[in-house]
Image (spheres, grey):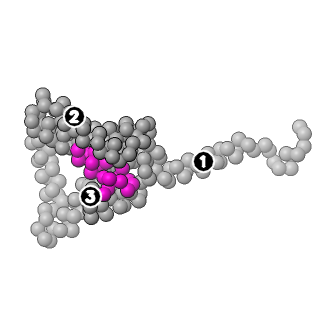
Amino acid sequence: MASGRRHDRATRWLALPFGLLWWPALGPAGVAVASGAFLLGGLWLSPDLDTRSNATRRWGPLRLLWWPYRRLLSHRSLLSHSPLLGTSLRLLWLAALVLAACAALGPLGAPAPAELLQRGRELWGSQRPLLLAAVVGLEASSWLHLLQDGDPIPRLPRPLRALRRRLSRLSSRSRRWRGPARLRGRRR
């Protein structure tokens, strides 16, 4: 497993080459968006937000927003370190936080959550190629992280690991069962 510094260094080194892959299709705007998303995904939205890490510290006082995420997910769990699923969950968490903040700050002039969602749909309709480059950049940086960690097979969430342990104990007991206790000492 790579250290936080190695993850950060690889993210910084590979952001521009990744962005240049988008030049033929999207030009300079695609390079900027894809490179920026790759950096954002590797440095601020890292799979390591489920533990105390450089990515968590970069959020400064806002790192408290990730506390529930960190408490609910164990490090390298299926939900945080899975390709596609991990990035999707982090983006959904951020979207939920933004929508909740808009709902809470509505009386102070913040846009309503429904209005924000409508603006997001309009943006998706008008800037779909650039948004796809951004999403792919976020996911690519996550894949880089997982590949640097070695075998990118994540662990099951805590409740499922506990259930698996219980089931394996039960199945190992049933394999060892040799009949009623009163018959165990007799020869057959």
Q: Residue at x 42, y 42 (%)?
A: 1
Q: Can residue 32 be seen in this view?
A: yes
Please, is residue 24 above or below residue 62 in the view? above
SS type, badge 2: helix
Residue 68 spot, x, y in % from top left: 36, 61
Q: Residue furthest top?
A: 24
What residue range appears in magenta? 39-57
Please name whichever residue, 5 or 143, is drawn nearer the observer in this view of the structure.
5
Which of the two discs, 3 and 1, labels the residue nearer the N terminus? 3
Instruction: From the image, tell me which residue sits under label 3.
Output: 59
**In the rendered image, which quarter is residue 13 located in?**
top left
Q: Which residue is drawn at 27% across and 51% down?
A: 44
Q: Is the magenta stretch mostly helix, strand or loop?
A: helix
Instruction: From the image, tell me which residue sits under label 1.
Output: 167
Q: Residue at x 13, y 71 (%)?
A: 108
Q: Which amino acid does label 1 sit on?
A: Leu
Residue 125 spot, x, y in % from top left: 12, 42
